[in-house]
Image: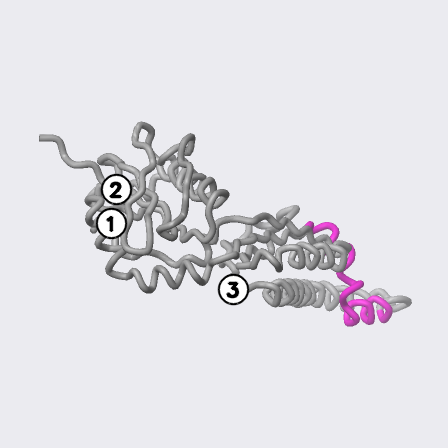
Amino acid sequence: MSKAALIYAYCLLPQDAALDMAGVEPIEAGSPLEIVRAGRLQAVCSQVGPDFEERTLNERFRDLDWLSPRAVRHHEVVDALFGQCRPILPLTFGAIFRSRDALRSRIERDQVALAAALDRLARKAEWDLKLIREEDAFHSHLRSASDALRALDAELQGKPPGTAFMLAKKIAALETAEARRVSAEVRADVHAQLSDLASEATVDELAPLPSEPRTRLEMRSAYLVSETAAAGLKLAVDGLSEQYGLLGYIFDLSGPWPPFSFAGRLPDTLG
């Protein structure tokens, strides 16, 4: 007897949400998207095969060639549905259940909390920001943001060689410290201004950078923004770009997206 297929869940929606899932490709070809209803909610799911079995899944998660296209497909499914229905509660990649009944029971168990999460996301979307810094421009204009560097530069003028050498070393050390200070202040200011326009906000922890990059990702952040505040968010980013553009900062704002960063997770899988 063949083993029953597993059920892969993508997202949760209110029970009365109307969806057209024709043409939305599932995570595995040949298993169309379907709906599992549970109380006031419904889940979008599809069948998946043995690659998603618990005994192999942890190993698969370490295989980027296997993981990456499936994670992209998961996001594409949720994004396509988000274009039709809001609110939507995206589930973390890898929400897998032994059967439709197991998925239904899991939703019913925490129906109140899940429905509250959907209510919290109503009429809101995620906006993502990448704050990028061009290093040449930043260091060329750092003195415009540092009174201390400008003061030492002025002090250096006309000094004898020995004194000038020591001052130059002091300036180099100060420039490193001032670069860190200015960078931290820019990140804090940008995040504070955008957070004021959002219901919730988050900043990713970034991996260490390679040595001496020409550009560097200074901050990657996400903002949960109501439909009525989205225009204000974009205007704020335009203003920040003008304010910090001379220092080499580039603002890459994208959205609206499904609120992956603010959805939490459905912790039990293979239920």
Residue 74: image location, x then y, percent: 40, 41
Q: CA distance from mark 1 to mark 3?
A: 29 Å
Residue 21: image location, x then y, percent: 40, 36
Q: CA distance from mark 2 to mark 3?
A: 31 Å
- Residue flagged by tag 2: what amino acid is it? Ile
**Residue at the disc numbered 2:** 7
Image mark for residue 103: 1
Identify the residue shown where x is 80% and y is 63%: 144
Identify the residue shown where x is 61% and y is 67%: 196
Under tag 3, what secondary structure?
strand
| Position above or below: 171 against 222 | below
Q: CA distance from mark 1 to mark 2?
A: 8 Å
Image quadrant assignment for residue 109: bottom left
- Residue flagged by tag 1: what amino acid is it? Leu
Of the two numbered discs 1 and 3 on the same chain, state the one appearing first in sequence. Answer: 1
Of the two numbered discs 1 and 2 on the same chain, state the one appearing first in sequence. Answer: 2
Q: Nearer the viewer, residue 25 or 188?
A: 25
Residue 51: image location, x then y, percent: 25, 36
- Residue flagged by tag 3: what amino acid is it? Glu
| Residue at the right extreme of this rendering | 158
Within 10 Å of disc 1 (Cα), the crowding (few <14, some 14-19, many 20+) is many
Within 10 Å of disc 3 (Cα), the crowding (few <14, some 14-19, many 20+) is some
Query: Residue 91: in sight, yes or no?
Result: no
Q: Are marks 1 and 2 in contact (CB under 8 Å)?
A: yes
What span is in magenta? 134-155
Of the two numbered discs 2 and 3 on the same chain, state the one appearing first in sequence. Answer: 2
Image mark for residue 178: none
Under tag 2, what secondary structure?
strand
**Residue at the disc numbered 3:** 200
Residue 143: in magenta span: yes
